[in-house]
Image (cartoon, helix red, strand yellow):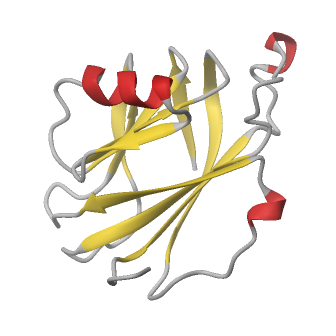
Amino acid sequence: MTQAIDYGQFYICCAPFLDPMPLLEAALSQPPCAGDGNAIVVVSPQQWNFQAKFRVEIWSGVPPQDSRDWDQVSLEALNVRTEPGVWLESATVDATPLPLAFEEVGYNVEVCGRESNADWDVESASEPNFEWRLRFWPHVEGH
């Protein structure tokens, strides 16, 4: 799927997300993301990309480790409710529902980005090969 990213940030949320500033400040102080259980703010090295690629996966258990294939990998928690589901949004962009069926449980969310290191180049800010992967799996103590 594609989602627009604006102002160098996007959000993963499952409830109305009215004030991203506290999480944005936390994500900026310890990049690339911060969450509070109801939302996750991810700081992108791209100021904007209106066709950012996202791959979204739901796993029944801990997915296989492949962090070497990604420039950054972060883990956050998200408490999912079946209504309204899980959404992606950005600072100036309408929210997009993720096209997957989520159970009403707590999930671990692995946020992976390619070309998301600190050395990114403004010239490549909207290159189509920049991509994100979001992997969800039910939270189990210790995992």
> Is residue 107 rendered to the left or right of residue 51?
left
Question: Within the image, what quadrant is residue 41 found in?
Answer: top left
In this rendering, the count of numbered labels is 0
Residue at the bottom extreme, as displayed: 60
Question: Within the image, what quadrant is residue 105 found in?
Answer: bottom left
Q: Quadrant of the C terminus?
A: bottom left
Q: Residue at x 40, y 82 (%)?
A: 142
Residue 78: percent from the left, percent from the top?
Answer: 30, 59
Residue 81: percent from the left, percent from the top?
Answer: 16, 64
Classify 35 as above or below 134.
above
> Is residue 98 rendered to the left or right of residue 43?
left
Residue 2: percent from the left, percent from the top?
Answer: 58, 42
Q: Residue at x 64, y 31 (%)?
A: 51
Classify 47 as above or below 127.
above
Q: 99 or 64, which lies in front?
A: 64
Q: 11 or 98, which lies in front?
A: 11
Q: Residue at x 59, y 81 (%)?
A: 63
> Is residue 37 rendered to the left or right of residue 56?
left
Q: Residue at x 24, y 53 (%)?
A: 37
Residue 17: percent from the left, percent from the top?
Answer: 20, 34
Q: 50 or 137, which lies in front?
A: 137
Q: 97 or 137, which lies in front?
A: 137
Classify 96 as above or below 127.
below
